[in-house]
């Protein structure tokens, strides 16, 4: 059974010299030799090697961590019973043997000294230093017996395999080992592999860790890597006593856990000392992991000792959760997000943006076939509307971008306020970019050029994540945007984020990302707010917009405004979702005309509790008065007065856009003042809540937040300010009672178009 991923079978002419072709594709089982690119793909891992380091198996220098081992055995057995092929590479024989020998020596000494020297000399007994090979010989059988007893509890059979480095250099022995392991896996037996430390020989000099066919078995890290590649394992999980790979030794200043490690990032790592027990350290683990990755096996290094995560660390990794450090060969294209802040200093001067628009505009239409076809396949009309790049959308987009090009020349560096604090001490407040923006949008590909234009016009760097439904369209539009920006040498100022996993990673980079703007469903906004670690999030919850028809409303205005608010573009967040009608309008010509119009437009009506009580028939009763339909559906509810309408809006609305239709100016003004929403309208459609229609050129979204920007967020909403003070050696002490200077705080007129 194959999982099919639909791509469009069409060609799109992007430039006269460039044609992009998309085909239908079926995802086949992953061929070995290519590791998983993202954590989410680890769910597909069929053959898994789990490496248990000495720090995981032992609780101190001479004792086994029985609780941790029991938890690990339970997880491995569970995955085995799911149909996966599990192998364990374990340490612990030396530690177990040391424990046994120490006990035997102490017991023997105590008996002899009790017979010959008396009890008072027991405290002077010393324990000899044990030879590691002897400890391994004494401990291996006990370690294996312990594993066997634990796995038996889950009806899982185990088998022991001991190897040395020489076993991999002898071709016949290597083939025998390979055959044995495959046969054990075929019989649903868990192989438990360890180096034969009782007879281990020195490592053979070779081109260690270079190339796919040669690796010297120095420790269980290199053994696990060699076995994983030899057995064509999908995943190697290396458990240690640290959370994963850090950029510097854990515990040192500025040490940060690396979520995803790419082979080219090795020079950015500072390694510490080796493990407190065992032979290797983090450097050995990384070298082994990279060798396995080169051989086609994905690798995760994680903590197998933490009491809060030990119980599910292995299963969490296989489920694709963010645990430990994931090694990936697939690095995002572009300059790399960590360098984007440097781009800010060389962003396009805003007055040049018109050139980019002219380059971009003629090629917009070609991408529409992608979005509309994908929407048709979904069978979901609101999604089709959001994905489609219709002629009307493109025309509005082009006009809006031209407006933005004209108005953006006086945005960055504009002086908002100038104050003479004292003689020869002048203060200015000027506009500056926010910094690096992360904008996540669902389904609407026309967001990409809008947000890109706003970011560049406001001097901000931009990371964009679009919905997977329009991934091809987004790639084409991003390509065109970068072509336009490349004219000025700043193509990397706007980058496209390809996976949800990358978004989760970016939401943690509070020192790099300055503002996150989710543009989509309330669920998306909530998810981003939860994921963001110390980064402000600007967005709205839902687009639950109300239209209230007052008792003194005009019939023609009411019918036209309701039709436009609901039916013009029902998938938009500024479309009407609830129609509030004054009780006196029931069974009047105005009410009848509105109902007839909604039926003609094929709008499904849900009755609110009050409205339903007036009806002799029962239409679909609303499940919740706080519902964003996003389609040709709406709720109708009856209110007793304008004040009741305001109260209803405050209780069930989302502070997005709310409308009153009335000919009574006093009633209208009361509504406009009392309704606490980002946009409040009188006798006009809710669909006017839009950056282009407000004359902002474009918008990054509509904010219902109460701080910073509110309503449609255009160019001004992507700017902040800084204060610049120019003096002549003054100090605060100069203005004290004993000082010679006095504050003036005089406002200085700002000439039109004044820049810092």
Image (spheres, helix red, strand yellow):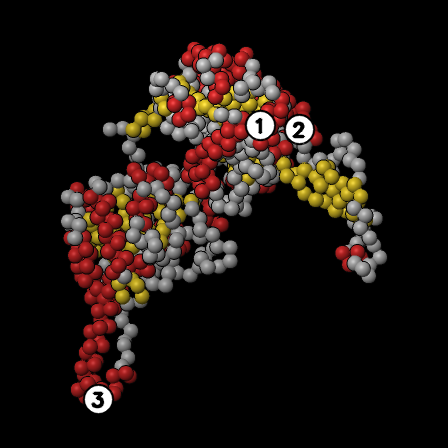
Foreground: disc 2 or disc 3: 2
Tell me if 118 is positioned left or right of 27 in this view: left
Q: Secondary structure at mark 2?
A: helix
Task: State the CA–CA distance, disc 2 to disc 1.
Answer: 34 Å
Q: Mark 1: few, some, or many residues within 10 Å (few <14, many ≥20)?
A: many
Q: Position of residue 597 (x, y in %)?
A: 46, 12
Which residue is more in the foreground, 254 or 594? Answer: 594
Q: Which residue is mark 2?
A: 408
Q: Which residue is mark 3?
A: 117
Q: Is residue 628 visible?
A: yes
Q: Residue at x 28, y 32 (%)?
A: 29
Tell me if 647 is positioned left or right of 735 in this view: left
Foreground: disc 2 or disc 1: 1
Q: Which residue is mark 1?
A: 671
Q: Position of residue 430 (x, y in %)?
A: 70, 39
Q: Position of residue 277 (x, y in %)?
A: 34, 63
């Amino acid at each position: 059974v194959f999982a099919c991923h639909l791509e469009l079978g069409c060609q799109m002419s992007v430039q006269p010299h460039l044609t992009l072709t998309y085909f239908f594709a079926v995802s086949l089982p992953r061929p070995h030799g290519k590791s998983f690119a993202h954590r989410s793909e680890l769910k597909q891992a069929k053959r898994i090697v789990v490496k248990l380091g000495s720090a995981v198996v032992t609780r101190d220098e001479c004792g086994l961590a029985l609780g941790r081992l029991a938890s690990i055995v339970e997880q491995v057995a569970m995955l085995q019973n799911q149909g996966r092929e599990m192998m364990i590479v374990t340490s612990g024989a030396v530690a177990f043997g040391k424990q046994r020998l120490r006990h035997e020596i102490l017991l023997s000494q105590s008996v002899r000294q009790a017979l010959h020297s008396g009890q008072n000399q027991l405290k002077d007994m010393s324990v000899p230093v044990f030879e590691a090979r002897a400890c391994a010989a004494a401990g291996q059988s006990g370690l294996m017996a312990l594993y066997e007893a634990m796995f038996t509890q889950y009806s899982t059979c185990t088998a022991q395999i001991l190897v040395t480095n020489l076993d991999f250099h002898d071709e016949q022995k290597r083939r025998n080992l390979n055959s044995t392991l495959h046969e054990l896996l075929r019989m649903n037996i868990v192989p438990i592999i360890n180096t034969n430390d009782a007879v281990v020989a020195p490592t053979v000099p070779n081109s260690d860790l270079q190339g796919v066919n040669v690796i010297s078995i120095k420790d269980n890290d290199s053994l696990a890597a060699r076995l994983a590649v030899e057995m064509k394992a999908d995943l190697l999980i290396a458990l240690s006593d640290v959370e994963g790979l850090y950029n510097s030794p854990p515990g040192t200043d500025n040490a940060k856990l690396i979520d995803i490690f790419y082979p080219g990032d090795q020079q950015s790592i500072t390694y510490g000392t080796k493990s407190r027990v065992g032979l290797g350290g983090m450097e050995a683990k990384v070298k082994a992991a990279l060798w396995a990755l080169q051989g086609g096996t994905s690798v995760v290094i994680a903590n197998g000792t933490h009491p809060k995560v030990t119980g599910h660390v292995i299963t969490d990794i296989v489920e694709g959760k963010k645990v430990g450090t994931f090694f990936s060969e697939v690095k995002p294209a572009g300059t790399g997000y960590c360098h984007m802040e440097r781009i800010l200093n060389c962003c396009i001067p805003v007055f040049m943006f018109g050139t980019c628009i002219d380059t971009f505009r003629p090629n917009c239409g070609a991408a529409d076939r992608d979005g509309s076809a994908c929407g048709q396949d979904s069978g979901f009309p609101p999604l089709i509307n959001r994905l489609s790049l219709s002629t009307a959308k493109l025309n509005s987009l082009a006009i809006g971008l031209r407006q933005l090009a004209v108005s953006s020349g006086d945005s960055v560096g504009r002086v908002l306020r100038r104050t003479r604090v004292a003689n020869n001490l002048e203060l200015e407040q000027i506009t500056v970019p926010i910094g690096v923006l992360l904008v996540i949008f669902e389904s609407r590909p026309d967001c990409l050029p809008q947000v890109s234009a706003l970011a560049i016009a406001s001097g901000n760097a931009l990371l964009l994540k679009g919905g997977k439904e329009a991934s091809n369209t987004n790639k084409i539009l991003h390509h065109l945007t970068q072509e336009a920006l490349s004219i000025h040498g700043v193509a990397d100022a706007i980058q496209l984020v390809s996976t949800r996993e990358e978004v989760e990673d970016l939401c943690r980079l509070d020192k790099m990302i300055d503002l996150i703007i989710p543009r989509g469903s309330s669920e998306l906004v909530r998810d981003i707010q939860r994921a963001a670690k110390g980064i402000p999030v600007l967005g709205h919850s839902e687009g639950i917009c109300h239209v209230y028809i007052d008792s003194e409303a005009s019939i023609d205005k009411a019918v036209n405004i309701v039709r436009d608010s609901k039916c013009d573009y029902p998938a938009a967040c500024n479309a009407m979702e609830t129609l509030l009608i004054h009780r006196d309008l029931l069974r009047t010509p105005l009410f009848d005309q509105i109902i007839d119009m909604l039926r003609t437009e094929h709008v499904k009506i849900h009755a609110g509790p009050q409205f339903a009580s007036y009806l002799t028939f029962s239409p679909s009763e609303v499940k919740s008065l706080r519902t964003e339909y996003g389609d040709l559906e709406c709720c109708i509810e009856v209110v007793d007065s304008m004040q009741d309408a305001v109260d209803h809006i405050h209780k069930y609305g989302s502070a997005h856009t709310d409308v009153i239709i009335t000919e009574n100016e006093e009633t209208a003004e009361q509504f406009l003042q009392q309704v606490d929403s980002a946009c409040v309208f009188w006798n006009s459609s809710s669909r006017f809540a839009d950056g282009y229609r407000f004359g902002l050129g474009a918008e990054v979204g509509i904010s219902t937040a109460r701080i910073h920007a509110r309503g449609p967020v255009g160019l001004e909403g992507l700017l902040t300010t800084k204060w610049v003070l120019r003096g002549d050696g003054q100090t605060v002490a100069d203005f004290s009672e004993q000082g010679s200077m006095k504050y003036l705080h005089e406002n200085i007129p700002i000439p039109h178009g004044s820049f810092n």
